[in-house]
Image (spheres, helix red, strand yellow):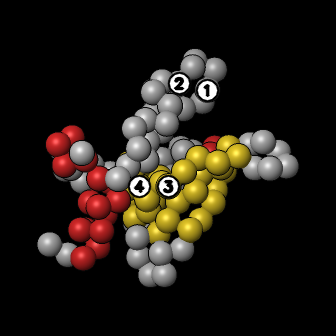
Amino acid sequence: MSYVLEEERQLVNREKDLIDTERTRDEPYGERCVRHGVYRHFKGGLYVLEEIAYDADTQERVVLYRALYGEHRLWARSFEDFFAELDRAKYPQAQQKYRFELQDLGVTDAARK
């Protein structure tokens, strides 16, 4: 097993339970639940969602996520941008529906304990 895949599995094993178990009807993300875990960016990079935080000035939600490649930098992006649906006119070749999509790494609930 590759080092990166093992690191991803370890991060998923440490994931927290659902941040939000359900969304209200007025939120734009419908049934997409926000979870800690490994997400794939539509351009291909893998990232782990570490936390949902709040901007100190605007009180808007931001997503803190770490790259699983290179220098493993920690990034911040607005909650809306992180979970946004892709603009098909701008990115017609994209394989994903959303900018970031949660990845199923095949980790069972037993492995998470």
Which part of the image, by quadrant, shows the N terminus? bottom left
Q: Nearer the viewer, residue 103 or 4?
A: 4
Q: Earlier in the sequence, mark 4 or mark 1?
A: 1
Q: Which residue is mark 3?
A: 50
Which residue type carries mark 1? Glu
Q: Marks 4/3: CA distance?
A: 11 Å
Label ID, residue 39:
4
Estimate the x, y position of residue 42 in percent, counting from the top left: 45, 59
Q: Does residue 110 appear in the picture of this structure?
A: yes
Q: Earlier in the sequence, mark 4 or mark 3?
A: 4
Q: Nearer the viewer, residue 1 or 84?
A: 1
Q: Which residue is mark 2?
A: 23
Q: Is residue 37 left or right of residue 92?
A: left
Q: Earlier in the sequence, mark 1 or mark 3?
A: 1
Estimate the x, y position of residue 100 in percent, counting from the top left: 47, 52
Which residue type carries mark 2? Arg
SS at mark 3 in the image: strand
Circles 2 and 3, Cβ within 8 Å, touching? The answer is no
Residue lying furthest top: 25
> Residue visible at 23% across and 68% down?
6
Q: Marks 2/3: CA distance?
A: 20 Å
Circles 1 and 2, Cβ within 8 Å, touching? The answer is yes
